[in-house]
Amino acid sequence: MDGGRTLIVSVGDYSFEQAKERGIYAFPSSYGRDHCDYVAFYRGKPIGAITHYAGVEEVLEDDTETLSQRDRIMMFPERMEEPATIFKLGDLIELDNPVSSEGENWIQSVMYRDLDEVTTADSIADLM
């Protein structure tokens, strides 16, 4: 079964709130993230789980109307001067069963999986 190519990202509170409230996920273009159909959000401690995902509706190049200087400082301060890529997202969907991190398994950067794998996993170890 194929649910769609899903980018799993580790996000802080600010980036997660922007996805939730404004329907955007932004990152420096130099990160070179591949095309995806969905973005799944791994939220660090104290949550320690993939809790939500959203469909990618559009990919935008850097634009100051969508991404403010404050957004850059809060989302990627170490690369805030670089051009950004912005994923316009559909509605954020909460997973019925959050994909928890256990022991040494957590998401620090990114990984790609099929959406079906994300929605049926019990733990990050299931996605490794």
Image (cartoon, helix red, strand yellow):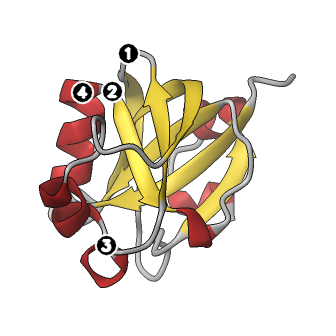
- Label 3 is placed on what type of residue? Met
Badge 4 is on which residue? Answer: 22
- How many angstroms separate mark 1 from mark 2 (CA)? 7 Å
- The numbered dot on residue 57 is none
- The numbered dot on residue 80 is 3
Q: In what element is the residue under mark 1?
A: loop
Badge 1 is on which residue? Answer: 91
In which image quadrant can residue 3 be found?
top right
Badge 2 is on which residue? Answer: 23
Label pair 4/2, CB-CB below 8 angstroms: yes
- Label 2 is placed on what type of residue? Gly
- How many angstroms separate mark 4 from mark 3 (CA)? 19 Å
- Label 4 is placed on what type of residue? Arg
- Among the two numbered marks 2 and 3 on one chain, the one whose residue lies closer to the N terminus: 2
The residue mark sitting in front, 1 or 2, is 2
* Few, some or many residues within 10 Å of mark 2 (<14, 14–19, 20+): some
Label pair 1/2, CB-CB below 8 angstroms: yes
Farthest front residue in view: 64
* Few, some or many residues within 10 Å of mark 3 (<14, 14–19, 20+): some
* Few, some or many residues within 10 Å of mark 4 (<14, 14–19, 20+): some
Figure check: 14 above or below 39: below
